Each structure stands twice: as structure tokens, then as C-alpha cells.
Image (cartoon, helix red, strand yellow):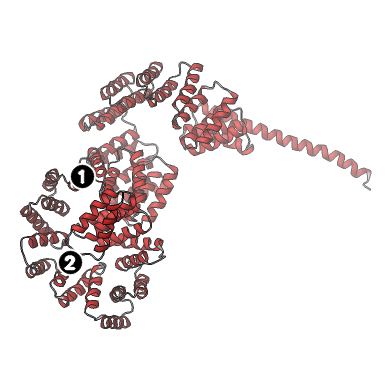
Amino acid sequence: MPSIRSLLSTAILLPMLFLLLFSSCSNEEKNKEQHYKKAMVYLAENKDKEATIELRNAIQIDPKYAEARYQLGLLYLKTGEVKQAFDQLQRAATLDPKNIDAKIKTAEFYMLSRKKEDARKNVDEVLQQAPDNKDALALLANLELVDGKQDAALTAIDKAIAASPNEDRLYAIKGRALAMKQQFPEAERAFLKAIELDAKKISNYATLSAFYVERKELAKAKATLEKMATALPDSPQPFLQMASLELMQNDVDEAEQHLTQALKIDPKNSKLKASVAEFYSKRGKVEQAEQLYKEAIESAEKPEDFEAELANFYFDHGKFDQAKVELDKVVKKNEKNATAQLVKAKFALKDGKNQEVLDITTGLIRDYPKWGEVFFVKALALSNLNDQKLVKEALLEAIKLSPGLGKAHSLLALLSLQEGDFETAKKEAATALKINQRDFQAALTLAKGVLFSKDFETAEKMFNELHTKVPENVEVLGSLGLTYMAENKTDKAKQTFEKLLTLQPGNAKAFTFLLQIAQKSGLQKDALIKMTRAQIEKAPASGELQILLGNLLLSNNQPDQALEIYNKAQELAPENPQPYAMSALILTKQGKTDQAIAEYKELLVKQPKAIGAYMGLGSIYEQTGKGNLAKEAYEKILTIKPDFAPAANNLAWMIAESKDGDLGEALRLAMTAKQQLPEDVHIIDTLGWVHYKRGSFGLARSEFNQAVQKQEDMPILRYHLALALYGEGNKKEAIKELERALSQKPPFNEKEEAAATLQKWQSEK
């Protein structure tokens, strides 16, 4: 039993503890209020850093201090720290449900990040407390517009206007809703009302001008911007908007004058200097652009942002050493700088590190989902990985976000050309050229689109114009030669291909066309062989020319000489699958397979990693029906050299043709082969065939189209293209391609099968 003394001690101690605890709490409450009050004073004095520190101190004492979090959120919003602003305002709205402004701003953040349901939930909560709150009603109207509900948007915005009839932004929202309903006169009146209520707000003029541009009323758009310039004489924005309008009309000189005026009005604006520098950069005025970027760096509070832009500029103009210097400067100051990360991705792309590019761009897209150039760089990496479907998706997103990104239009044009979509190719190439008249690839793609659309006269004119500008470009000469052949201008075609071969003696494709012309003129096979040997003397290291010679010797019943040439081709072009297959074919026909197998195996005893020997074995085993042994040979090669294209290609084909084959593995192998040899028609055909077997008919069609464009005289390629077209449901085009395949002279093993397929398709209703 406790003594009276101990009970008395306890009785005295407990009140003292309570007193101390209460005193501590009281002090903390007092301290947090002092920090908050100091912050408010600093805010009034525009001392943002000091205010931030005090507000953080208050929140550290009391994490549930809603008002401090709200003020800190507003402060972060002011300083452009968007993520931190959202975090604080969202927390403030949760802690204090009566803080309507915090809820509205949180809803705005949700809307900007495309979380419509979360935004709507916050707006509904505000309207339950304050049904006539104009900010909540305006946000609701915007949400309805995003969902395409114009009538609901008008109901909300009219209610907001009734509550606040003199607020200009509400009329701007109403104008957008009316424009979406195609009530254009009413929309125009709403936009004009917004300007009437606030003639000093830039966005009111910009919105009306954009409305006129969309309606193609360019004169009205220009008049609006001129009115804006008069109302805002100290702002560069009217002249920037005018420059943008003039660039749409391809009036570069006028645009440059207005950009110069903008700089005169605001000569210390680093962002403006960087924007004008970008304009100069796109138009090839490299020195002026570089100078403006440097001036932007000198006058900027955060020079690293513009150093990153300068690095990007240097990279895009091929000045990689200078780009690296600027990039290193930025990374030392701020490793997470977004533009620096983009330049890093470009360097990785240059070095062939495609997965690294995808890792960087994925992070950038997460943080900056509306940055078009990031999607374009991602598309380039995907293109290197031969993922055409994802390439197209990334390009379309890049163009949607940045319609003026000429490089994206140019690449989409090239992709469409490869897919056989010539109309899209021409349209996108023309757009790219409108943005950048010096885009050579776009000009070439446009001309090719015209050629493949069979407008030969126009194509001839376009290729001749390109040839005048770049007289030694072999791709232009090759395309011009093809155009002459399509027009039956044989002499001009011959002269063009001969000129090409003086520039590039080993160009087997151009020489193939010369052989065709010579054969049509009556030259016999002996003369064609002599002609080919003469060309090989000019390009002795060309494995492709050796293959042509081997094919001619074989067709001239000279198999031993052909075999010798194919062996030489294997030495010169070990990555090309064709000479291995042709050698195996000859040995099989001669009954020398056992001898050849023994020789290859003997070589492997001496040289266990002799890839050529394994390829020879694989080809012979494949042609003699020993599929398992062929697969083993190809798999062995891939353990020695995982990206060896011929083995990957042949193994992909065998897997695709085998019953219950792993089509995913076949696709991986086929893509590996194409990544190494993107121009080889046999490899392109294999990738297309794997796509076809997987039921990806659109992807298959794209590959087969590329193969046909590269070698039009191979009927098997057209047969495969026809199958893909039929799989897509394009029966008319499929029949057309199959008829063309069967009409071509070169034989192919599947000819009877193709004829039966054609008959079946033609009999279908």
C-alpha cells in the first residue's frame, strides 16, 4: 500500500506535467503563427524565398496547418514549381474542405493532367457549397467541352456570366462552346465581348485571332493582331502572333520583320531571344541563331535553361563537340533539366543506344506529355528497332502536339511511302517542305510518291530539279533512272544509271537495271557476263556484284563457275544470306552435299567459330529437308554472333514455317536481321512473312511494300504483298498485285499455289 508521502508526491507531479504539456503545445501554436505571419509580410514585400522558408517552418510544426499549405501552394504556383504547387493545394483542400479556391485550383491541375473524373469530383464539391461560384462553373464548362457536351458547357458558362457579367474570360469560354456548335457569328460576338471587357489582355486577342485562322479568315486575324498591337504597345506578343500567322502563309520575310520588332520592344527577354533564335535555326541562319542563344544565356536569371537550348541547337546542326560542352555545363548545374535530357537522348540515338533513348523519352513524356519533339526522338529510336506500328503512333502524337515540326512530317511521309500509302506520303512530304524548304528527304519522298502514283511526267520534272541541286546524289539519280524506265525512255535511263555507276561503281541495283536494258536490246548471256565482269573490275570489293555474276553464270548453265563466285561473294559480303543459299542449291543439284558437309565439318574442327561453315551447313541441311540440323547450325551461329543477319533471318523463316513455331521468337530474330541489313529484300520479306503469320496484316503489308519497291521483278514478293492485302480485307488490290506477280517472267516455287489462290479469290462473291 502506497504511503501518504508518495500519494502526495504524485498529486503534486501530475498537474505539473499537464502544465508543461499544455505550455509546450501553446508555444508550438504560437511559433507556427509567428512563422505564418512572417511569411505574409515577406509575401507583401515580394520576398518569395524567405516566405517559402517561413511557411515550411509553420508546416513542420503543424503538418495539418491548412492555411499555410494553401499559401505555400499559391507561392509555388507563382514561381512555376507546378508539382509542388499541386501537392500543397491538394493537401490544403483535403485539410480544409471549406477552402473553395484550393479545391478549384486542385481541380484545374487534375484537368490539365487529363484526370477528368478527379477534376469533376472537386468541382461538384465546390458547387454543392457555392452553386453560383463563377470559377467552378467556368471549370465545369471546360470539362463539358472536353467531353464534347457543348450544350451542357453553355448552360454552365451562362450561369457563371449571370453571376459575374463583366468577367472577360467567361465570354472566351462561351465563344469556344459556340464555335464548337458551329454557331460562328455568336461565337465571334462572345470573343469580341471578351476584348471589350478587357482590352489589355493578350489571350483575348489571341483567342479571337485563332478563331479567325481556323475559319481561314486570315485578313480578320491580321486586323485583330494589329488592334492588339495598338492596345498593347509595350508587349512583343502582337508581333510574335503576326509572325506566326505569316509563317502559316509562308511569308518568311514579313515574319522576320515582326520578330525583329518584338525584340526591339523587349530586348532583355531571354525567352524571346531563344524563340527568335529557333526561327533563324529552322531557316538555316545558323550564325544569327547562335548569337541570339548566347545573348539569351547572358541575360537570363537561370542561364542553364538556355545553355541546354544552345546544346540542342548545336546538336541539330551537327556541331556535336560544341553540343557536348554546353550539355556538360547544364548537367553540372541541374542534371534533371528537361532539354538537357532531350539532348542526352539525341546523343544516345546517335550512338545507336535505342533502349536508352526510350528510357529517357519515356520519363520526359511522363513529365511533359505535350512536348512534340520528345515523341519525334522516341519515333526515331523505335524506327531503328523496326517497330513500325509504334513509330507511326509516336509520329502522329508528335505532329498533333507540334504541327510545325517538319522533321516529324518528313519521317511520316517516308514511313507512308514504305507502306505504299502514296497519297499520305505526298501530303506529309509537302507539309514538311512547306515548313522547311531545304528538307531534302521530304523533297525526295514527295517525288517518289509522285513516281509510285504513276504521274511519271511530274516525277521526271521533280527528280531533274533535285538532280540540278544535288548532281552527285545517287538516290536521286536512281529514282530518275527508274522514272525514265517507266516512261520507256530507255536511252535516258541508260545514261542516268551509267552516270550513277561512275559515282558509285559497286551499286548493284543500278547495274541490275543496266543489265535489264542490255538484255532487252538483244545482248546474249555471254555478253552480259562479260559486261558484269567489267563492272566488277571497277568495284572488286562489291559482294552484290559478285552475286549478280553468280546468278548469270548459273542461268548460263555454268554451275561450277557460279559456285566459285558465290564463295567469293560470301567472303566479300558475309552478312548477305543469298550466296550461302545459292551455293547450297548448286551443291544439292550436283549431288555433292555429303562432300560439302564433310568439308564444312573439317573446317569447323580447325576453326570452331567459322560462321561461314555453319551457314553452309545450315543452307544445305535446309534445302535437303533436314530442318532440325539446319536450325542447330543457325542457332550455333547466333551463340557466336547474336546479330548475324543471315542466320537470324533463316532461322526466323524456319520457325515461322514450322507447325506450332514460336512466332514471338521468329519476330525477334527477323527484326534483329532487319536491324543489321535494313535494305535486303529477302530479310524484309522474312519480317513481313512473320508479321503475316502472326495475323498482323498491316505490318506485313508495310514490309512487303518496301521489298516490292526495292525489287519489282521478284514475283514472290508481290505474291506475299497480295496475301497481306487480302488479310487486311483489301481484296481488289490483292487480286491486282497477284495478277501482276503471275504476269512477271521470273519463275517462283509458289507459282501454282499463287495461281490457285487467284482463281479462288476471283470466284468469291
Residue type indicated by callout 2: Ser
Q: Which residue is mark 1?
A: 446
Mark 1, other Cα within 10 Å: few <14 / some 14–19 / many ≥20: many
Between residue 215 and residue 736, name the one nearer to us.
736
Q: Return the mark for residue 129.
A: none
> Residue sitting at 29 percent across and 77 percent down?
613
Find residue 479 and report its horizontal and vertical position in percent.
Answer: 15, 51
Relative to 288, say whether 493 is above or below. Answer: below
Mark 2, other Cα within 10 Å: few <14 / some 14–19 / many ≥20: some
Query: Dividing the picture into quarters, in which one does residue 744 lie?
Result: bottom left
Q: Which residue is mark 2?
A: 542
Between residue 203 and residue 608, name the one nearer to us.
608
Relative to 192, say whether 605 is above or below. Answer: below
User: Judging from the image, what secondary structure is the residue with disc 1 in?
Assistant: helix
Query: Dividing the picture into quarters, in which one does residue 179 lie?
Result: top left
Find residue 280 and report its horizontal and vertical position in percent.
Answer: 25, 38
Residue type indicated by callout 1: Leu
Please indicate, yes or no, whether residue 564 appears anywhere in the rendered image. Answer: yes
Find residue 345 and report its horizontal and vertical position in percent.
Answer: 36, 50
Q: How many numbered badges does the structure rendering display?
A: 2
Find residue 258 and report its horizontal and vertical position in percent.
Answer: 25, 28
Q: Are marks 2 and 1 in contact (CB under 8 Å)?
A: no
Please indicate, yes or no, whether residue 336 appears anywhere in the rendered image. Answer: no
